[in-house]
Image (tube, rainbow, N blue to C red):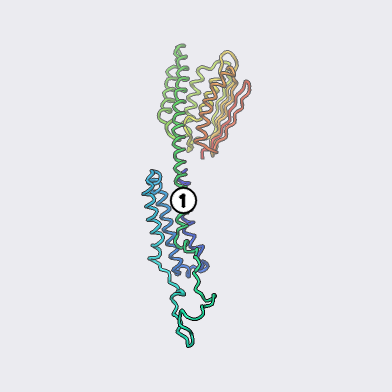
Amino acid sequence: MLKNRDLWINLLIGLGLLSIPILTSPDFSSFGEMIKAVGFRRNFLGYLLLLIFYYLNYYWLVPEFYSKKRHLLYACFLLVCFVVITYLPDLFFKLPDFPSNSNMPFPKKIEGMPPMGQGPSMPEGFKKKRPPINLFELRDSFLIQFIMVTILSMLLRLDNRLKEMQNEKLRAEVNYLKAQINPHFLFNTLNSIYALTLKKSDQAPWAVLRLSEMMRYVVTESDSEKVPLEYEIQYISDYIDLQKLRMGKHTDFTYEVKGSPNGKRIAPIILVNYVENAFKYGVNPDEPSKITIFINIDSKGVELIVENKITVKQNEFLEQTTEGNRNTKRRLDYFYPDRHQLDIDHRSDFYAVKLYIDLT
């Protein structure tokens, strides 16, 4: 995404630079006359060289010399580029010289006129005046344009590098969060299988197979930035199947998936935290509990709705859910900035999560 944004910005800057000599040409209304004009061709070549310098500075000079604190070499390259941009257009398209007052022929001696240096001085109005400073000479040398292009390309490149560093930091942070999440899943699932083995249940081999599938997903897919949505849903289904093993008769449980996940991809292990919380704090063998889980898939994204009755002490619930929810929220902000909506309804004995992620 960042690369596409920078590419479009650089293309727009390139079109903008090349359009300046066209839009500012006095022959803009007549394309044929404009092309024939020597001044236009000189200016157009100058701006073309400025554009080449912009890309050179953005992609090579700033990252290779300025960012690596090789400032003297960077300044030398800037000087060479400025000289080329200033003088090369004049070598190809030399502007005609206009006669100046100093080159005009001196008037012949007139009878009766005293020799030079004698007689009354010339009237003040006939004295030779110093020509005014031509501010357009700076423009014709491309000095101002060169400074602006240098600053613009440098700022954009440094800003791009700063964003890359921030993304690298976020990726490292997300990988750390994954390392915290995965052992948590394993610990809870092993507890369920351990309970089956104590009961000598025939479902223990089946549960081990389910755990095996879950661990395969965690090991092989969780390092990917995006995975097929059907893999994530299958992982949730396997997790729910294992949790059903410890449900008592007092649990009212509903799980439903609507829509087709085909063709959609999602960040791995980003939905299951809320499903896990529902089982962790909504299942109690000593009192009635209710858990409802809906997954709705539409043409743009996926919606997860989880509702459960809280059957543990409030203090324990708040302390243990805060960190997991914070980690999930940070991953949502990283992978889906401005493309997700999370609503949490927390009451004294009820907890509900509604999450929608735009996967387009």
Where is residue 87 drawn, in percent x and y? Answer: 39, 62
Residue farthest right in this picture: 348
Q: Residue 202: image x %, image y %? A: 44, 15
Amino acid type for the residue under numbered disc 1: Ile
Q: Is residue 32 above or below residue 138?
A: below
| Observer-nearest of 76 and 297 | 76
Identified at 43% across, 65% down, the residue is 42
- What is the residue that sits farthest to the front in this orientation? 119
Q: Say which residue appears at 39% left-offset and 55% top-offset.
A: 79
Residue closest to the eye, 112 or 169: 112
- Left or right position of 346 against 91: right
- Image height check: is 275 above or below 261? above
Q: Sort mark 1 into few (<14), some (14-19) or many (20+) by Cα contacts within 10 Å.
A: few
What residue occupies the far bottom of the structure in this picture?
Answer: 111
Residue 63 location (% of width, % of height)? 40, 45
- Percent coordinates x, y for residue 237 in the rendering: 49, 26
Q: Name the residue carrying label 1.
A: 151
Q: Nearer the viewer, residue 237 or 181?
A: 181
Q: How many marks?
A: 1
Report helix, strand or loop for mark 1.
helix
Judging depth in this view, the residue of 168 and 356 nearest the camera is 168
